[in-house]
Amino acid sequence: MSRLLICLVPLITVTGATGFAKESNAAKTDILIIVGPSNHPPGSHEVKAGARLLAHCLNTTTSIKGLQASVHYGWPKTEAVLDEAETIVFLGDTFPPNRLPGSDVILAKLGSLMNKGCGIVCIHYATGLRAEDVTAEGEHPLLRWMGGYFATRCPHHQSIARIYEGAEIKPAAPRHPVSRGWKSFVLTDEPYINNYFGPNKNQLAPRVTALATSMLPPGKPKREVVSWCIQRDDGGRGFGIVMPHFYRSWQVEDLRTFILNGVSWTAGVDIPANGVRSEQPSLEAYDPDAVEPR
């Protein structure tokens, strides 16, 4: 992607992913969006275009003042960019810190940021960890930082990735701040199921909250957690959501509000009653490889 296109995306910054909520009129809040590698076909994932779209929605929302999001393709080279972030959002094919060059150094730095209360968000496949990323028992720092993950080809657990026609996504914690301003919605997408939440019979840990569920798969449905969050002991917050797979799904207003709420909440921002609202985005404006999958 050219430098010119990157500069055209409005920047956002998020501050304060500590245990207390910020006033909506507080100082600027730095949100760092990091894009990892992806080799999916055009129209699916579109992690670069999705990151630009997300940044624009955060930077232009009138629901909260002071959000300032920036997009980085790969791990930022400037230490200050990382240290100033209130939350870090990842998009990519599996958890980018494990896929980018120098992963050991990246994970160590990320760990120090998490210990200081920085927030973390993973969207769709960025929630994923491979067998080589985890111990035989499934341990990985992301389990503590975000409360769960999508286990892809792991011996300890097998999550499931399939496209579902007309999957209904329902709020699971209506009183949680991330649930404000959006309602149940239906979409054709790839909400991962049988996600991994820990060794205790895959039950959510005490500080982890299921935010959305769906009755999947259609032939033998059970209530599957497709988004969750954690309020960590270090004061930081994590948010995981296993959608959207298709770039076109960003046009679903309830899904978009849900994601904007989750990102803002992990940055320590107080979520308004109507949620973090955004204008309907024009998908072509963020230079995707394709709007529809080929």
Image: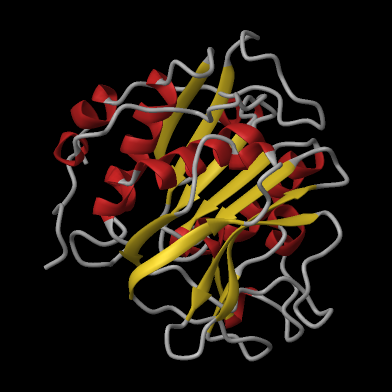
Q: Quadrant of the C terminus?
A: bottom left
Please tell me whether residue 284 is drawn above or below residue 189 in the rendered image.
above
Q: Is residue 102 visible?
A: no
Nearer the observer, 242 or 166: 166
At x 52%, y 83%, the residue is: 221
Q: Quadrant of the N terminus?
A: top left
Nearer the observer, 35 or 164: 164
Q: Is residue 235 visible?
A: yes
At x 46%, y 27%, the residue is: 69
User: Where residue 81 sits: x, y (%)?
Assistant: 55, 28
Nearer the observer, 16 or 58: 58
Colour scheme of the picture: secondary structure
On screen, residue 140 versus residue 87, left or right, reads right
On screen, residue 253 versus residue 130, left or right, reads left
Please tell me whether residue 144 is drawn above or below residue 51 in the rendered image.
below
At x 28%, y 60%, the residue is: 246
Q: In which image quadrant can residue 187 be found?
A: bottom left
User: Where residue 30 sits: x, y (%)?
Assistant: 56, 24
Q: In which image quadrant can residue 150 be found?
A: bottom right
Please tell me whether residue 114 is drawn above or below residue 68 in the rendered image.
below
Please tell me whether residue 224 is drawn above or below residue 50 in the rendered image.
below
User: Where residue 170 sits: x, y (%)?
Assistant: 53, 58
What is the number of callouts on the image?
0
User: Where residue 271 sits: x, y (%)?
Assistant: 62, 27
At x 33%, y 51%, the residue is: 47
Nearer the observer, 146 or 83: 146
